[in-house]
């Protein structure tokens, strides 16, 4: 029976603990407030899943570095964010800290509330080490959770991370009641923007057409269960960002991701028109209505 240790007892960590237990793994769920110590659940773990939000990744990596993690332990990261200081993804941070361990990214259209209700979902386990990805596939696949594998961890991770920016835009679109045509245009134009960024950062374009890209974009941009969608919806309804985040009481990674993405786009000269309007909106530079108008009035160009 594999030993699975989940770090982070938030919405997604708790759902992943349940999914792992359902398949028969021995599961340890650890969080900062746990009464037991981290070392006791790391020793002997076959797989360690990091399910902390982006702001907790650095501290979690440091905690594990202070312990003796076996090089045979697979590290799975499910965080959908970008580090503000380095602009690196969580898997890049984990790989840098643990060069001898296999790192697997688990990402897909996986709204935790639906998964906790036992509704069916699919996801992707991605790694340079295909054998490690397949181990994670076996540990997590069940009659309600179908896991695919691929060898593009960065593209898989960036799909899940970048879609949060567009989920904010989609929430704005629905909050302003702009209609189905506008929403379809937004989601369709979001995909090449994600691909443009992903390819410049070293991912494969085709990964973004799969579950972790288009799949997660559709799930998050169409569901009020998404916290990022709720950020955009609230802004369109005239709430302040502070008020929305206060009411959420949970992580909306898209806010930080938008800021880091615009830094990256400015540094590397990547064209990100939709993300730039989301950035201006989040930073109080424009109203939701102005953001829409700015996109409509862009220079005309071929599709
Ligand atoms: N909830 C969902 O449906 C899904 C969430 N994710 C991603 O998983 C990550 C976690 O999301 P949720 O569990 O939903 O968020 P959450 O807000 O429910 O939980 C965040 C977790 O991170 C931990 N954390 C934060 N700062 C920390 C620190 N300094 N040290 C240690 N732990 C720290 C918290 O204690 C908590 O366990 C996010 O990056 C999110 O984008 C991915 C797929 C689905
Ligand atoms: O990533 C998610 C679903 O795949 C969860 O989306 P939110 O973080 O916007 O709630």
Image (cartoon, grey):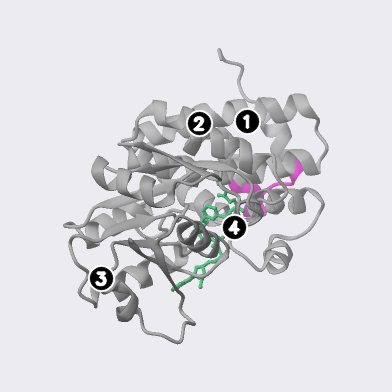
- Above or below residue 285? Residue 21 is below
Compare marks 2 and 4 and give the one earlier in the sequence: 2
Find out whether the residues at labels 1 and 3 contact each other: C-beta distance under 8 Å: no
Callout count:
4
Compare marks 4 and 3 and give the one earlier in the sequence: 3
Compare marks 1 and 4 and give the one earlier in the sequence: 1
- State the CA–CA distance, disc 1 to disc 4: 19 Å
- Label 3 secondary element: loop
- State the CA–CA distance, disc 2 to disc 1: 10 Å
Left or right of 4, for residue 298:
right
Left or right of 289, for residue 136:
left
- State the CA–CA distance, disc 3 to disc 2: 42 Å
The image quarter in which residue 292 lies: top right
Q: Mark 1 points at which residue?
A: 187
Find out whether the residues at labels 3 and 2 contact each other: C-beta distance under 8 Å: no
Q: Is residue 297 visible?
A: no
| Quadrant the C terminus occupies | top right
Label of residue 57 in the image: none
Query: Is residue 286 part of the magenta span, yes or no?
Result: yes
- Above or below residue 205? Residue 158 is below
């Amino acid at each position: 029976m594999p030993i699975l240790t989940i770090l982070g007892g938030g919405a997604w960590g708790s759902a992943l603990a349940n999914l792992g237990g359902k398949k028969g793994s021995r599961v340890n769920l650890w969080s900062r407030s746990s009464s037991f110590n981290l070392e006791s659940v790391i020793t002997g773990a076959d797989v360690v899943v990091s399910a902390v939000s982006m702001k907790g990744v650095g501290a979690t990596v440091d905690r594990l570095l202070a312990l003796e993690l076996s090089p045979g332990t697979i590290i799975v990261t499910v965080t959908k964010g970008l580090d503000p200081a380095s602009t690196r993804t969580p898997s890049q941070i984990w790989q840098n800290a643990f060069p001898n361990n296999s790192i697997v990214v688990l990402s897909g259209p996986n709204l935790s509330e639906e998964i906790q209700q036992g509704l069916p979902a699919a996801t992707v386990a991605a790694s340079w080490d295909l054998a490690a990805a397949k181990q994670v596939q076996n540990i997590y696949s069940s009659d309600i959770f179908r896991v695919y594998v691929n060898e593009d961890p960065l593209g898989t991770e960036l799909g899940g991370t970048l879609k949060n920016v567009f989920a904010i835009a989609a929430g704005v679109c629905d909050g302003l009641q702009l209609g189905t045509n506008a929403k379809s245009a937004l989601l369709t134009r979001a995909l090449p923007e994600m691909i443009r960024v992903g390819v410049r950062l070293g991912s494969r374009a085709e990964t973004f057409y799969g579950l972790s890209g288009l799949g997660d974009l559709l799930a998050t941009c169409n569901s009020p269960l998404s916290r990022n969608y709720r950020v955009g919806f609230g802004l369109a309804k005239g709430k302040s960002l502070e008020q929305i985040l206060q009411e959420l009481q949970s992580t909306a990674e898209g806010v930080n991701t938008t800021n880091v993405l615009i830094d990256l786009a400015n540094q590397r000269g990547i064209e990100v028109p939709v993300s730039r309007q989301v950035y201006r909106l989040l930073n109080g530079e424009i109203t939701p209505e102005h953001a829409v108008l700015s996109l409509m009035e862009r220079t005309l160009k071929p599709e």
